Image: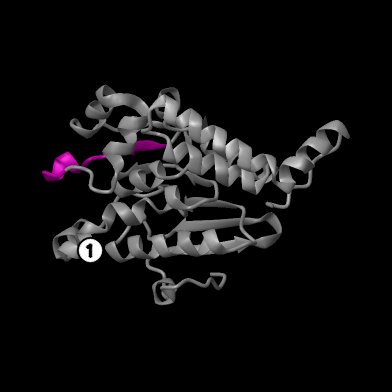
Amino acid sequence: MTDLTHRGQSLLQDLDGFAIEIDAQRERADIILHRPPLNVISMHARDQLRAAFEALDDDPSVRVIVVRAKGEHFSSGGDIKGFLDASPETVSKLAWNIAAPARCSKPVIAANRGFCFGVGFELSLACDFRIATDTTFYALPEQKLGQIPGSGGSARLQQMVGIGRTKDIVMRSRRIPGKQAYEWGIAVECVADSELEATTDALVNELRAFSPLAQRTAKKLLNDTEDAPLSIAIELEGHSYSRLRASDDFREGVEAFHGKRKPVFRGS
């Protein structure tokens, strides 16, 4: 793991079931789930994942974050026994911790293969982009335990695919294959399993080519206006557009366009 600084530094020591890799040259950070064989996510790991996203958000060498996993499966979900042992205070933070990718100002990609169940699916839903493969299955199977999703899964899914499809997934604990997830708009791509890494790399490079300031602005604007009335969303979009007009990156983009060259964005 590359050293990271964070106000809760102790949380980033002895990472529980995942690792962090930073490639400063490629302006990329990877959060890699690794708890064989199914990459179960513990209660403690949720706290650590939140701290990791916050630290990477503050790291100027990182432009794009990828969440992926070692092995055949992204994650089969959470540590079920951990739910019974967790304190009410810990349980109250579940959704906040798993929403860390959404709060992060940088683009976050989830590379999903194999099982992507429960909190693994919820973590992926909080990311900006999901790439599925022909081996991927998404599910929120909490009904089988006499529970419902507790980390934002049903709420985020309903925003993406509507109440009817969300009921079908949640109330029946249905497994949705990657191709269907792509057709429904849950995943931005569905590729052969052997192409997952190359497809993820290509999306990272695509996102890196844009202005980091414009990327942060677009992400925050879209997240903040998801539930806003259309008139409010348009008004906020206009304010954000006006602020970006004064940026160095916008000037560079315009000059590069007229000069028929590739822009070099600095994030200012």
Residue 61, placed above or below residue 197: below
* Residue at horizontal 70 percent and vertical 46 percent from the top: 247
What kind of residue is marked 1?
Thr
Res 168 quadrant in image: top left
Q: Which residue is drawn at 32% across and 54% down?
A: 96
> For the residue labelled by badge 1, is the local secondary structure a helix, a strand or a loop?
helix
* Residue 12 sits inside the magenta stretch: no
Per the rendered image, the range of residues in magenta is: 136-147
Closer-to-camera residue (227/205): 227
Q: Which of 227 and 102 is in front in this view?
A: 227
Q: Which residue is drawn at 41% across and 74% down?
A: 14
Does residue 18 appear in the picture of this structure? Answer: yes
Task: Kindly identify which residue carries mark 1.
Answer: 90
Instruction: Indicate yes or no whether the magenta region holds residue 143.
Output: yes
Single out the residue that lies furthest toward the right.
Answer: 259
Please provide percent x and percent y for residue 188. Answer: 50, 32
